[in-house]
Image: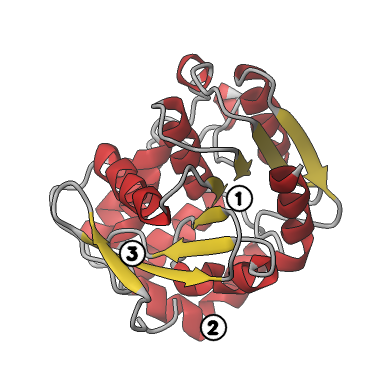
Amino acid sequence: MAAATTPTTTVQSADGTTIAIDRVGNGPALVLVPGAFQDRSTTGGLAKFLGDDFAVFTYDRRGRGASGDTPPYSVEREIEDLDAVVGETGSSPFLFGHSSGAVLVLESAARGMSLSKVVAYEPPYIVDAEDRPDRLAERVGSLVASGQPGEAMKLFFTEGPQLPPEAIAAMEQSPWWSANEAIVNTLLYDLAIVGDQVVPSGRLANIRVPTMVLSGRESAAWARKSVEAVAAAIPGAQHDSLKGQTHGVSDDAIAPVLRRFFLT
């Protein structure tokens, strides 16, 4: 996570929490919703890719960057945060969410938030019950509470997105790792959003805006199965798999897909 920078603007969520927002470009509004250990600096590169075609809004989810973090946490409060950002766009924007951010996007759309279209990249549901990690949120929470942020992160990346050991080892050696140990408590928010990791087919069936669900062809098998199940639950949803991509999809790979879906 990069050091917090001064946001373009801020909005107040329903509980009074300050949410920091940046805007890039002009055109129809598009809000980018980041996943675990991401903030508006993480999505800033994608915003620049898309700024010629959209007014792109990036924001710090609560507890990250320049945004506040009013306790107690709840998923409904995160949805209210996103609704405040949507209100700042002055329209019914497009939404793109990655990982837990994809779940946040889908849950918001299912609740009837005023949106035009949504894209969700690898919402971390696990279709096969035997593949769901056992009490992951509880075990991560115990490590966080006992002052072991690095161990909490390793457990999450191993059993959550199921990153290979060599990828996790490389991350541990980077400045990114130590910077994000400082906000490891927000990982518990991401795990709360995902819940029991069962695809909430009943709620997703309430989504009435055009929806696309995406995975990377090089991602773990759970991602493809999740995308297929989510798309099947949403009326009229499309799904696709991006060549050469993993859970950490690259900006230059996702940008043309978003441009094509949102503008046609």
Q: Which residue occupies the foreground of this view, 149 or 88?
A: 88
- Disc 1 to disc 3, C-alpha distance: 18 Å
> Disc 1 residue type?
Gln
Residue at the outermost right position: 243
Give the spatial CA distance, label 1 vs label 2: 19 Å
10 Å crowding of disc 2: few (<14), some (14-19), many (20+): few
Could one spot residue 220 in this view of the protein?
Answer: no
Inspect the image, locate mark 3, and give the three-letter code of the amino acid beneath it: Val
Circles 1 and 3, Cβ within 8 Å, touching? The answer is: no
Residue identifier under label 3: 184
Cα–Cα gap, marks 2 and 3: 16 Å
Q: Position of residue 74 (x, y in %)?
A: 23, 41
**Location of mark 2 (residue):** 174
1 or 2: tag closer to the N-terminus: 1
239 horizontally vs 168: left or right? right
Left or right: where 123 falls relative to 258: left
> What residue does disc 1 label?
162
